[in-house]
Amino acid sequence: MLRALLLATLPAILSAAELTIDHVTMAGPDLKKMQADLATLGIRSEYGGPHSNRATEMAITSFPDGSYLELIAPQPTADPKALAEHYWSAKMKAGAGPSAWAVRSADAAVEVKRLQTAGMTTGALTRSGRTRPDGVKLDWETATVGPGPNGVFFPFLIRDFTPRERRAFPSGKPTTSDFEGIGKVVIAVRDLNAAVARYRKAYGLAEPVRQADAGFGGQLAMFPGTPVVLAGPLPNAKSWLTERIQLLGEGPCAFILRGRNVSAYKPVSKSRWFGNEISWLKATTLGYE
């Protein structure tokens, strides 16, 4: 069975100073089931309401630093055509778990121009939104970066027109205070060197630090000061990363949270990445079986 590593924790010292995470997305076929799976880890989520695309609905776990984990699945009465055309349709159907991520942008138009100047392709700025269960309307714009599906290899840009706090904190405060926020996005890639070059070109980054993790099954490249960790399959070895990429393409395969009060959370395994211990909270098969 194909694994999808979901969540891990690491000490709060590895915060990201650049590419500020707005939110990360986990996709599946059934929102209530996804919420229940997260609750078994001790992490609560709040229903956030349907999107205006007539295809998806979401739940949210928000953190004190303003980042949040989005659970996304088809609406019970989704329009079949709209759902089939959704950029994460295959990921929802497969129960991919980690699927995409977004970064905050104070001026998305300016950032789009900067990326284009750096030789990157971007999508048009697109207005979107949703209405919370309490009737509060949320309004934002997004833009894709790169040729792939929205927010999969590169993060997509998001800028709010309504106050961002209304989107990040539906109850007026973080959903949990056990974690500071989302610290790292681990992106499964086919060719690690090629992926490193693409990120350096897009964001003007210095060379990453690298290591291999046989237990994780990958070669890792982390850009210091950013939330980005690229993970390529180990050479000459059968890897769950290879299987995942073959099924779903390149994209997030794990999200790492910065810990605050996590003594009550029991890891299923541990890793040591770049001098820091990571406690993996859960690994599961695609489809949440």
Image (spheres, rainbow, N blue to C red):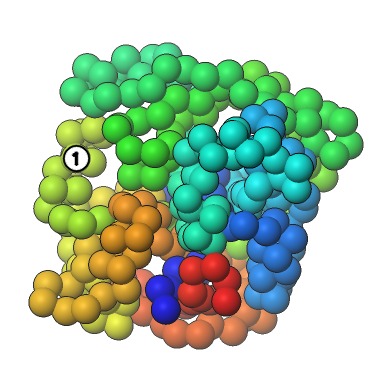
> Residue 241 lies in what quarter of the image?
bottom left
Q: Indicate the quadrant containing the N terminus: top left, top right, bottom left or bottom right.
A: bottom left
In the picture, measured across the screen, residue 289 lies left or right of residue 123, that is right
277 above or below 16? Answer: below
Q: How many marks?
A: 1
Q: Residues within 10 Å of mark 1 (few under 14, many from 20)?
A: some
Counting from the top left corner in percent of width and height, residue 192 is at 17, 56
Return the residue nearer the eye: 13 or 283.
Answer: 283
| Residue type at numbered disc 1 | Arg
Q: Find residue 59 and report its horizontal and vertical position in percent.
A: 71, 50
Residue 188, image x and y in percent?
31, 59
- Using the image as rendered, state which of residue 195 and residue 67 is in the foreground: 195
Hey, which residue is sitting farthest front in the picture? 80
On screen, residue 114 above or below 90? above
Q: Is residue 103 above or below residue 68?
A: above
Q: Nearer the viewer, residue 27 or 40?
A: 27
Please name the residue that numbered disc 1 is placed on: 198
Q: Which quadrant of the view contains residue 238?
A: bottom left
> Horizontal placement of 87 versus 134: left or right?
left
152 horizontally vs 188: left or right = right
- Residue 172 seen: no
The residue positioned 45% from the left and 30% from the top of the image is 157
Q: Quadrant of the C terminus?
A: bottom right
Residue at 30% x, 68% y is 243
Q: Residue 96 in the image: x percent, y percent?
A: 49, 60
Question: What residue is drawn where x is 24% and y is 32%?
Answer: 202
Q: Label 1's element?
A: helix
Q: Is residue 25 visible?
A: yes
Q: Residue at x 29, y 33 (%)?
A: 147
